[in-house]
């Protein structure tokens, strides 16, 4: 009977390891596919999810970025940053993530 109890514990550990590898590979693939290209003219900007559209617009305007398109998520905008330090200014304005806009086009269209 003792042997029957140890096998499920080992199976649980194997499943947990497989799950960790799956999540880690998903993050790695997402990170590589969402990267912006150097010198990109248009980028997608993710602001904190609790921000409303007005606050995201004000943050983009304070970074001197022109809004190209809005999405179904109010805190996710597609903008054209200023050529001089535009991405740095967006991050200083509160942007969490700057990514390739084509990667989110199908998912967050309004």
Image (tube, rainbow, N blue to C red):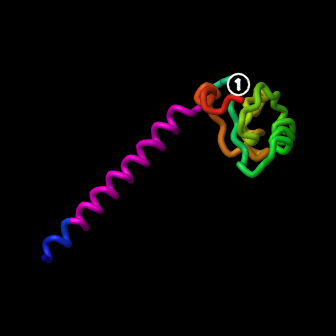
Examine the image and state in which quarter residue 40 appears: top right
Residue, far front: 1
Examine the image and state in which quarter residue 107 appears: top right
Rendered view: 25 above or below 17: above
Determine if the magenta segment contains residue 84.
no
Q: Main secondary structure of the magenta part?
A: helix
Tell which of 108 and 41 is nearer to you.
108
Residue 66 seen in the current view: yes
Q: Which residues are magenta?
A: 8-36
Tell which of 43 and 69 is nearer to you.
69
Residue at the spot 84% in from the left edge and 33% down from the top edge: 64
Residue at the spot 86% in from the left edge and 36% down from the top edge: 61
Residue 101: percent from left, percent from top: 64, 28
Examine the image and state in which quarter residue 105 appears: top right
Tell me the crowding category of disc 1: few under 14, some 14 to 19, or many 20 or more residues within 10 angstroms, Cα based.
many
Residue at the spot 81% in from the left edge and 41% down from the top edge: 53
Q: Which residue is mark 1?
A: 42
């Amino acid at each position: 009977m003792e042997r029957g109890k140890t096998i499920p514990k080992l199976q649980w550990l194997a499943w947990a390891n497989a799950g960790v590898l799956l999540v880690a590979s998903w993050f790695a693939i997402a990170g590589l596919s969402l990267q912006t290209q150097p010198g990109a003219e248009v980028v997608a900007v993710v602001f904190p999810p609790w921000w409303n559209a007005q606050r995201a617009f004000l943050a983009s305007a304070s970074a001197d970025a022109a809004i190209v398109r809005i999405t179904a998520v109010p805190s996710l905008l597609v903008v054209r940053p200023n050529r001089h330090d535009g991405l740095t200014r967006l991050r200083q304005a509160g942007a969490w993530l700057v990514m390739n806009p084509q990667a989110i086009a199908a998912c967050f269209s309004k």
